[in-house]
Image: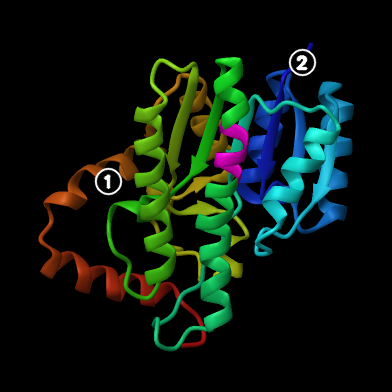
Amino acid sequence: MKKTALVTGASSGIGLELARVIAKDHYNLVLVARTESKLKQLADELHAKYDTQVLVIPKDLTHETSAEELFEELQKQGIEIDILVNNAGLGVVGRFAETNYARDLEMVKVNVLALVQLTKLFVQGMIVRKRGKIMNIASLAAFQPGPNMAVYFATKSFVLSFSEAIAQELKSSGVTVTAVCPGITQTEFFSGANVDMPVNPLSNWFIQTAAQVAESGYQATKAGKSVHVTGLINNLSAMTAPFVPRQILLPFADILIKSFGKNH
């Protein structure tokens, strides 16, 4: 009997590529995102290519009841989740005092609240079954503050800290938690966050494709790693960030992130 993975934010980007990687590994899937038509298109592709069963559940995770509704629906259908992928995320560039208040709250609800809710709801069954994997998509942003993306960077720091802590709590339970930390990735996130993709001769050295991140993150999750930074350059950046004085790091991040933004 095939196991089942649940992927949030599965309609595009890293989530879409994770769905492909996991389906290829002979899992059934539950795909969650706001856009039902994109999910159905992906479901058809995965079923045809890998003969996997795919359940599409359109949900907007900015609604605080969505996580519980999703969990209850799967409970009613008797579907157990073996891999939970908390991938859905929002971001926006801008000075905190000037960004849209509602958008900031949506970021917190999706990046933090929904992730905590879904982890809380599904980890209980995993513990009882003594098996299961949780993949939380954090970011290279988790390792430092981010002026001009203050809320986004802070939410990803939360994801990293939260994931590491519960990974330790769950040792010897049969359940693993992996915080996957990609750097700049070619996805629709940039347009949604009001950010220009950097284009220069060095871009190929540090910008990864969504497929590269998905494959790397999935293998780390299968191996039970607690933290996985994707890409060599990103690893070097994560390792050196704690040793760079804040009085140097923060002004540099301020200029760099602002240079990516549009319509300031």
- Mark pair 1, 2: CA separation: 36 Å
Asked whether 172 or 29 is in front, the reply is 172
Which label is found at residue 163? none
> Does 170 appear in magenta?
no
Residue 185 visible to the viewer: yes
Give coordinates of residue 197: x percent, y percent: 50, 64
Q: Which residue is mark 2?
A: 2
Q: Residue at x 27, y 68 (%)?
A: 253
Give coordinates of residue 64: x percent, y percent: 65, 61
Left or right placement of residue 180 versus residue 17 in this view: left
Quadrant of residue 168 within the rendered picture = top left
Magenta residue span: 118-123
In the rendered image, which quarter contains the N terminus? top right
Give amino acid for label 1. Answer: Ala
Q: Residue at x 29, y 64 (%)?
A: 145
Q: Which residue is mark 1?
A: 238
Up the image or down, 21 lies above or below 35; here it is above
Up the image or down, 26 lies above or below 90; here it is above
Report the label total: 2
Q: Residue at x 89, y 28 (%)?
A: 48
Provide the major secondary structure of the magenta segment.
Answer: helix
Asked whether 130 or 139 is in front, the reply is 130
